Image (cartoon, grey):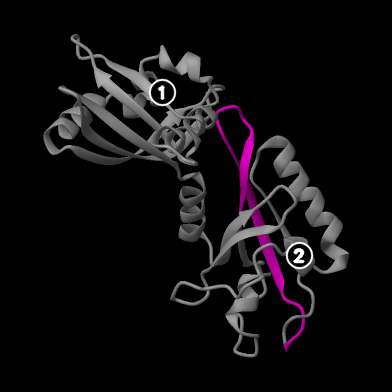
């Protein structure tokens, strides 16, 4: 049976408690496994650190002001960059609340990793993105979001779990697999054009997939984000296409 302690320890999102000592220095009280894994530093090492040391220099300079706001309002939300064990910058949301523990005031923080969202947003600003999502280590689609229709797209049951490779023409398959493998090996963004299998009334369509491995503080891949865009020189899709649901799942 879950207890409050086990829910905190085993939560999927990073969580930690802090307090301010007599010298107004922030110290950890407790943290959970997900936060330790995200940062890439062991729990025992983190507990003796100053939490402010985990923020990148640009964010660290603003911590005094943010602590004052948290003290006054009792709640604070901010987007931050934290430094992982190997210096990698981690994009996160931090939700902080002031709580009472006996006769003391302490602070509870929930940390959500948002690297995927930030990366996809940067792609959407610069490219005609048709779909975006997340792949697992086997290149199976975990989540996918359609950008072709103006409204959020709801996938039919069974679509998540399909391999991205299953929608690529066999002639381009090896090329795409090599590009994705290099992206994962070197932890770098890669892109490659390919032709789809014949799902369309007008025949196969030329697309470009851009993949971005996202890592934690230990440089371990936690997910692979991707976007699909029109390949250069292939114009605008016409109304003879099948419904956008299939387009989203290419």
Q: Residue 27: within the magenta?
A: no
Q: Residue 208: within the magenta?
A: yes
Task: Pick whichever, 183 or 157, lies toward us.
Answer: 157
Residue at 76% across, 65% down: 194
Q: Is residue 99 left or right of residue 249?
A: left
Q: Is residue 57 left or right of residue 156?
A: left
Residue found at the far left of this picture: 72
Q: Which structural element holds mark 2?
A: strand
Task: Pick whichever, 195 or 39, lies toward us.
Answer: 39
Residue found at the far front of this picture: 1
Magenta stretch bounds: 201-226
Q: Is residue 170 above or below residue 58?
A: below
Residue at 49% across, 44% down: 115
Q: Is residue 31 left or right of residue 240?
A: left
Residue, disc 2: 194
- Pinpoint residue 233: horizontal percent, then vertical percent: 67, 71
């Amino acid at each position: 049976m879950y207890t409050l302690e086990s829910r905190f320890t085993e939560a999927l999102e990073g969580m930690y408690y802090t307090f301010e000592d007599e010298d107004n220095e922030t110290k950890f009280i407790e943290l959970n496994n997900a936060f330790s894994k995200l940062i890439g530093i062991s729990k025992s090492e983190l507990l003796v650190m100053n939490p402010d040391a985990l923020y990148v220099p640009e964010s660290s300079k603003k911590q005094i002001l943010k602590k004052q706001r948290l003290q006054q309002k009792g709640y604070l939300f901010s987007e931050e960059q934290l430094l992982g064990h190997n210096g990698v910058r981690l994009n996160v949301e931090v939700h902080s609340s002031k709580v009472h523990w006996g006769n003391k005031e302490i602070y509870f923080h929930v940390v959500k990793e948002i690297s995927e969202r930030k990366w996809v947003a940067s792609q959407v600003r610069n490219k005609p993105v048709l779909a975006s999502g997340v792949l697992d280590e086997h290149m199976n689609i975990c989540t996918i979001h359609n950008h072709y229709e103006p409204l959020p797209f709801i996938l039919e049951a069974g679509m998540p779990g399909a391999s991205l490779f299953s929608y690529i023409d066999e002639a381009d398959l090896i090329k795409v697999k090599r590009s994705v493998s290099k992206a994962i090996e070197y932890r770098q963004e890669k892109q490659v054009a390919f032709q789809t299998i014949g799902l369309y009334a007008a025949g196969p369509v030329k697309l470009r997939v851009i993949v971005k491995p996202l890592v934690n503080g230990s440089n371990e891949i936690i997910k692979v984000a991707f976007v699909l865009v029109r390949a250069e020189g292939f114009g605008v899709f016409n109304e003879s296409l099948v419904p956008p649901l299939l387009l989203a799942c290419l």
